[in-house]
Image (tube, rainbow, N blue to C red):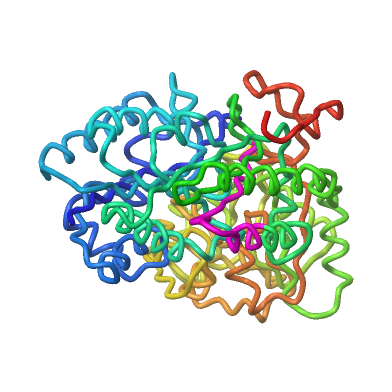
Amino acid sequence: MRIGIIGFLHESNTFVNTKTTLKDFEASHLHFDDEILKEWEGTHHEIGGFLEGAVRYNFEPVPIIVAIAMPSGPLTTETFEWIWNKIEEGLKEVGDLDGILLALHGATVAIGNLDADGEIVSRLRSCVGSEIPIIMTLDLHANISDRMVKGVTATILYRTTPHVDQLERGIEAAEIIVRTIKKEIEPVQSFERLPMLMNVIKHDTSEEPASILLHQLEQVLQRPKILSASIGYGFAHADVQEMGTSVVVIADKNYEFADEGVCWLSEKIWKMRSQFTGDILTPGESIRKAMTLDGQPIVVSDVGDNVGGGAPGNSTVLLQEMLSQGVTNSLIVIWDPKGVQECISKGIGSEVILQVGLNSGSLPVAITGKVRTISDGKFFEPEPRHGGRSQNNQGLTVVVETLQKNTIVLTTLRMAPLSLHQILSLGINPKAKKIIIVKAVVASRAAYEDVASKFILSGTPGATSVNFTLLSYKHRKKPLFPWELSAEYRSGN
């Protein structure tokens, strides 16, 4: 069996001013052909799972392209078409395939293509014809369109947040495609989109209410003839018609079993909808609370500047709060290429006076300190972590230490805090810090749970604010809970 491997993943925030270009993919992950085997074998990503599945289930993986960029604004038209052209060219070059394993995000937006994932699926299906099985994996935060589901044989989403099960989902996809090719099974899908969205502050599947849904999902998986089941929590910062919560269940041959599983799970989710809303501390409240708690470090999430949701990662709101409240012994990572260059020009051991956050929507903050470290910003993550990637690069990076023992890390490339090695590689001991600010919501917890004394969510302003009343939607469906409390749902409609 020859099975094609394609990966094209980007979480697109339509509320930021930036656009995602080919350079953003090149700075993150853009690999072709056999280079994919070298870069992705042994990783905890679903691409790693595809390749592990090739060994387990005895097929030849035919790598074509893996393109991943850090979440940010929508892709430019040129970038989207360039990547698609590489997919199309690769399909022609590799010859006949027995199937395709396709890793998409599910919340990718391109200029002129709000349903970019659906467009890729439609074009891919047109290229290979109707007979070849295509198994698609998606992020848990996918906004799933009808085109995405209709164009593939089976749809599989991550089940956990933080996303630590990506490897398993890739292996699952590999098993299903092999059994399909061998005619051992005949996957059929049932898909339901609910008129609701779950707030990201409630997405941690190790805690209620999301842990309850994970248990209910596992109950569906135990039903006869069920091959897979998934919940798409949705991505609120992509203003598209499909934005919201969805359910997919795959059965072997039997549409009735798939439909029953979808309806049962959808009804459970709908009844719990009010549990997926909630209040969040203000920036001032979150820092005051962190200062009063025993133990360290207290990890405070800068929710409005969540790099993993497309925010720039350069907000100084919480840094300003810490300085105003007299916090000492803290750690924060800020994207500030200009600050990095200033520090490098002065050299290690030099005293610097910087205005950090100059590129952010928040006010710049003056800091005085010594340049402690200059690094190339590359680090390796060996464990399963949100995002599933092993090789990481935050660009040229500097560490500045202030007299108050506040450690300011400045980077030239945006990096989500998904690995503790992001700071360990810089010689920083996280356990020695009282407060650590992370530019994330819950995705960073897999990395920080072994060292954190407590996690606090801070409702900061910014491109990923969870105060959705501040966002101007043009394309989402109405009514949609929690925006419109009048939203109604009946299973099977």
Q: Position of residue 107 (x, y in %)?
A: 52, 38
Residue at x 65% of width, y 74% of height: 449
Q: Vertically, is 388 above or below 349?
A: above
Q: Vertically, is 465 above or below 384?
A: above
Q: Position of residue 187 (x, y in %)?
A: 42, 48
Q: Quadrant of residue 37?
A: bottom left
Camera-side residue of 307 and 357:
307
Left or right: where 147 falls relative to 269 = left
Residue at x 51% of width, y 51% of height: 157
Span shown in magenta: 217-236
Camera-side residue of 316 and 259:
259
Q: Vertically, is 298 above or below 159?
A: below
Q: Quadrant of residue 93?
A: top left
Q: Position of residue 189 (x, y in %)?
A: 49, 42
Left or right: where 102 falls relative to 324 = left
Residue 149 visible in the shown view: yes
Q: Vertically, is 294 above or below 44?
A: below
Left or right: where 393 falls relative to 424 = left
- Magenta segment: does it hold 232? yes
Q: Position of residue 385 (x, y in %)?
A: 51, 67
If the image is split into quadrants, where does the N terminus sit?
bottom left
Residue 336 visible in the shown view: no
Left or right: where 98 falls relative to 223 = left
Residue at x 39% of width, y 33% of height: 151
- Magenta segment: does it hold 456? no
